[in-house]
Image (cartoon, rainbow, N blue to C red):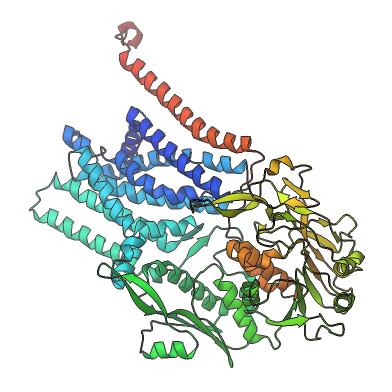
Amino acid sequence: GRSIFAVAGREFRGYFDQAHAYILLVVFLAANFFFFFRAVLVTAEASLRPMFGMMPWLLLFFVPAITMRSIAEERARGTIELVLAQPIRESEYLLGKYLGISGFLGVALLGTVAAWFALSAGGDPQTGPAFAQYVGTLLLCSALVAIGLWASATTRNQITAFIIATTVTFLLMAVNLPVVLQGLPPVVATIAQRLGLLAHHSNITRGVLDLRDIVYFLTVTLAFLSLAYVMVQRGRRNPSGASFRKLQVGVLGILAICVVVNLLGRHIRGRWDLTPGGAYTLSEPTKALLGGLEDVVTIRFFASRALPPQAEALKRDVDDLLADYAAAGDGQVLVQRFEPVAGSDAGAEAEKLGIAPVEFQVLGEDEFQSRQGYLGIALQYADGLETVPLVQRSENLEYELTSAILAMTESRSTVVGLLGGFGGPGHDTDLAGFVSQIGTAYSVVSVDLAADSAAIPDSIDVLVVPGPTDPMTPAAGAELRRFVSEGGNLLLLFQQYGISEGQMFADSASHPELDALLVPYGVRVAEGAAYDMRSNFPVTQELATGQQFQRPYPLWPVSMPVSTHPTVNGLTGVALGWASPLDLSGADTSTVTALLATSQFGGVLTGPFPLDPSFDWTSVASDLRPRPVAAALLPRGSAGSSSTGGRILLVGDADLITNRFLAASPENLRFARNSVDWLARDESLIGIRAKQRQAPPLLYSSIAARNGARYATLIGVLLLLVLLGFFRLMRRRRLAGHVWSAADPDDTAP
């Protein structure tokens, strides 16, 4: 043990006594911060994930440059024989080298922590995912150091060692690139996916420490350290001797075990979810539902073996989720897996259950070829059947499966009405995406109040008013008030501005009947349009050359949660279009809760105002402060539950549920679903969507603050590193040039 740490300490200190190590550190950190800030300031998310997404490609060159001289130089100088002549074994020598280099890389990663503080100046980065990302990168460094040591042990030339290490590392990374996977046969592509570095590192950067990924990096480290040990022993043993051959056979056995373990890694279970709220772990509402099942739910997962390589990671996530469902069901959830092909019994069963094959493209002989495959889920409970014909994303799969089980186990389906007429958006056009998503959990019907005698059917539990642009009739207004007073629940999307294509200025429209509905609550929709100078959604414009670019548009504010209400819990921002602010000054705070508001850089434009995104918005910006744009209204009286009447969820905008905004902002769909669930008093589904997977927003108080955080990190860390290196090297030079005098015999006499 002491020999290992002695070698490790010597190796670690040796890097800080050489100028080239400081140069490598400066280049590594400069490139890291440069690419990180370019990405994170565009996404405006307080997350280190862009940095760790780029990290493997930086380490591809940085680690071989560090390890290339570790053994090759000592072999070229002949000092390795001197070292191994001491009472130290070859394995101790190798492990010491490994620990010393790993410690130096740990110092390099420690320098990247400055990016965390830069994000903290403009946002609230999540500590759990960041911790997992650093652990995952340390594991990646461990594997790359082992590869570098092996490469350095194979030659006496440092440049050759660098080329070998870089080439092997690149090959292990390249096998996970889509352009490579698409050209491989399906079976080979699956093997490459499981043996590649990038797939396992990207899984950890989500914020989840999966045992399969940890085992992968540890086995890669073990495999290449074993190969390095063979190369060190080759110079000290007879290569044709029996003992060396036994060593080779033993190492080949280790390599085979490492490969088999990773190929069968899908059977390894266990993970540590460090994301806020356990975004990749079953939510409590799902566990409660599965734990209370009275009959068996059968889940059939149909996944073809010859799927596109990029679907392999999705298939792994689905397998993990279904395994969690089976564990939480305590015997009441049966999961069956099938690998159907066209014409097979499994394929016929899938199509019988409503899961049709889909076509996808794979790269064949120098051209793309079309193939058919299955990737769907069927759920059965008693006589009920629900299907997910094509699994496209894993992020919302828990919601889809749990809502499907709820739909089969509940005796009566909640009915959601969608008010038509009065100039609102079309149900089959602008609101098609919203209707489709809500329809997965509820029965959706249209409601027409245009006629004076029209009434809201008694079967309606929740009524959605999707932003009428024309004033409602007094009869329709009276019917809405009756519906709410008798316990009906209302999602009121107030559209004060109807914007059409090519319109230059916005004019407001009055809605006296809707205003009258809100008066008893002390709430009103204020005049004007809310804008946000910092937190806004970009608009895409096209130049005369045909080139498209994005421009910040303050009239499309990205509103932020301002309470812990179930409808906004876990959300990061909801994009709105030409929204109106709410005046809550006269509201009873025990029954009215603000949900969403602009950032501190929000304001209000009144009167006819320009709509052109290229307008100089700073010229009209004034009185900037948070402006509420959504609120939850409980029945009047006490704090809600015992009072008569229904719930109202009021938003000063209806564009948020149109196809354009739902497609561009996933948070809009989450908020819309949460709103309907809360109004339907089905808050169990909200708990599933409350799991936050999107990073918090990154909003600096000013451009100067943003640039200050950026350049203080980029320049400050590098300058500190240069100064430390300069003073340490100067100190060594002074010590090397110091003339030491012989000790006085009288001073040393006893």
Horizontal and vertical percent position of residue 679? 76, 73
Q: Quadrant of the C terminus?
A: top left
Question: Which residue is at 78% across, 55% downward?
Answer: 628
Quadrant in the picture for residue 90: top left
In this picture, residue 330 sits left or right of residue 674: left
Residue 622, above or below 576: above
Question: Which residue is at 51% across, 30% downward?
Answer: 716
Q: Nearer the viewer, residue 73 or 318?
A: 318
Q: Nearer the viewer, residue 740 or 363?
A: 363
Kindly tell me whether residue 310 is visible in this rendering. yes
Horizontal and vertical percent position of residue 385? 56, 88
Quadrant in the picture for residue 443: bottom right
Horizontal and vertical percent position of residue 504? 70, 54
Residue 59, above or below 511: above
Quadrant in the picture for residue 437: bottom right
Residue 621, above or below 397: above
Horizontal and vertical percent position of residue 353? 49, 89
Question: Which residue is at 63% across, 43% downward?
Answer: 122
Kindly tell me whether residue 305 is visible in this rendering. no
In this picture, residue 620 sits left or right of residue 742: right
Question: Which residue is at 38% across, 31% downward?
Answer: 22
